[in-house]
Amino acid sequence: MQNFIFRNPTKIIFGEGQIAALNAEIPPDARVLITSGGGSVKSNGVLAQVQAALGERAWFVFGGIEPNPIYETLMQAVAMAREKNIDFLLAVGGGSVIDGTKFIAAALKFDGEPWDILEKQAEVRDAMPFGSVLTLPATGSEMNSGSVISHRARGDKLPFNSEATYPRFSVLDPTTTYSLPPRQIANGVVDAFVHIVEQYLTYPVGASVQDRFAEGLLITLTEVGPQALDEPHNYEVRANLMWAATMALNGLIGAGVPQDWATHMLGHEITALHGLDHAQTLAIVLPAMLSVRREEKRAKLLQYAERVWNITRGSEEDRITGAITATRVFFERLTVGTRLRDYKIGGASIGTLVAKLEEHGMTALGEHGGVTPEVARQVYQMSV
Ligand code: NZQ
Ligand code: ZN
């Protein structure tokens, strides 16, 4: 196992009816800016529950944060927060709303042009305190310090993270997910699955605890993913999906092990160029990424085949191919297409995708730094 420091300061408040607990988590004299997306939290009643919990506090709402949150919109929220003298932010929604709120929180305390936080990876030393009410199990943003922001004018989608951008608390009420359309449930399962794979499917370092946690989460997702689509109001299923997605990216399984993240970085470029959902890009890139890098990942691919997919027969090559195929079949069973052509995209943009990776300095991705622009090109080509 590699050396590590692990600390996660986010308090999780889990379960049905827990939105009311907001009252005890936010200072009584706070001036709160509620941030939200395109309207789902209004129609499913979550916003009304939040407002009831805030009671007599002064609160305001900034709506309209898009999926794949956009810098230009978030800067409007920054202006509103300044104008209203806000001192606490409350994200109510999915990963995009929470990511967007992390950026707003950082931008409010940042000296200079906030886009530098993404483009130049300028250090974020301070951020306005914020909490979240999660409505979409997927990203883990509710219990991590990461955020991914898009710049419409530049066609960029870039990540940042900082110790200052952990939520103070996150409320996870599985019943808030009942209103999710099947496409977003499927996306969430795929995203969480790939987060685990990025931290697990690298090379062995003798980290049995992390491996077994990761395998348990992967198997849980293979079980509850299809059930969540079949039985949208099954509380037990939604609760397990929600907690698995949070545990997939809160630092626990990634501590002390090598991490990959090349699939995510190649996926971000597809979203920036073609507008696909985040998870759709991962479902496209991952099977191709594993195929192209099967030698580098051989030992872990064999372990993944056996322990997650129960593939124990045949040659090593057969077992590895079987595990990659099982992964693809799982995504497709959730109705998430695994090839660019499923989204009516051909190979014509591959040159642009690779050039964007280079422009963003992403020329040595993966756990060994071996995903060069040439390897990325092979992966994109294989994913057509
Ligand atoms: O905008 P509203 O109206 O709220 O609708 C949203 C949106 O259209 C809808 N939705 C959310 N909760 C709902 C609901 N509809 C009905 N009922 C509910 N309970 O779902 C749609 C998608 O929402 P979004 O927040 O965009 O999805 P997700 O949570 O998958 O977030 C994706 C974003 O997170 C980033 C992605 O790149 C992408 O920008 N990621 C963030 C990470 C992190 N912070 O650690 C890691 C991930 O790898 C990922 O990159
Ligand atoms: Zn992701």
Image (tube, grey):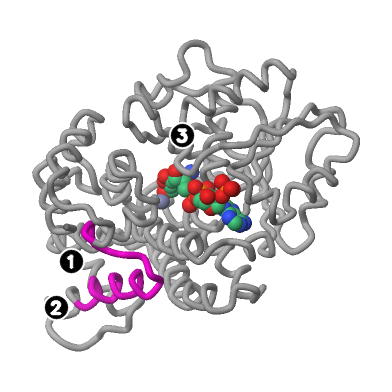
Q: Which residue type carries mark 3? A: Asn
Instruction: Please tell me which residue is depicted at 46% across the width and 34% down the height of the picture.
Output: 161
Going from N to C along the chain, the mark reached first, 2 or 1, is 1
Q: Relative to the observer, which residue lies in front, 199 or 255?
A: 199
- Circle on res. 316: 2
Q: Which residue type carries mark 2? A: Glu
Q: Residue furthest right?
A: 56
Task: Determine if residue 363 is in view.
Answer: yes
Residue 338 highlighted magenta (yes or no) = yes
Residue 43 highlighted magenta (yes or no) = no
Q: Nearer the viewer, mark 1 or mark 3?
A: 3
Task: Indicate if the residue with disc 3 has its beta carbon within 8 Å of ligand 1.
Answer: yes
For the residues bearing labels 2 and 1, Cβ distance under 8 angstroms: yes
Q: Secondary structure at mark 2?
A: helix
Q: Position of residue 200 (x, y in %)?
A: 34, 60
- Circle on res. 161: 3
Q: Which residues are magenta?
A: 322-341
The residues tagged by marks 3 and 2 sit, at their Cα atoms, a distance apart of 38 Å
Q: Position of residue 151 (x, y in %)?
A: 39, 29
For the residues bearing labels 1 and 3, Cβ distance under 8 angstroms: no
- Circle on res. 298: 1
Task: Determine if residue 143 is in view.
Answer: no
Q: Is residue 178 above or below residue 376?
A: below
Task: Indicate if the residue with disc 1 has its beta carbon within 8 Å of ligand 2.
Answer: no
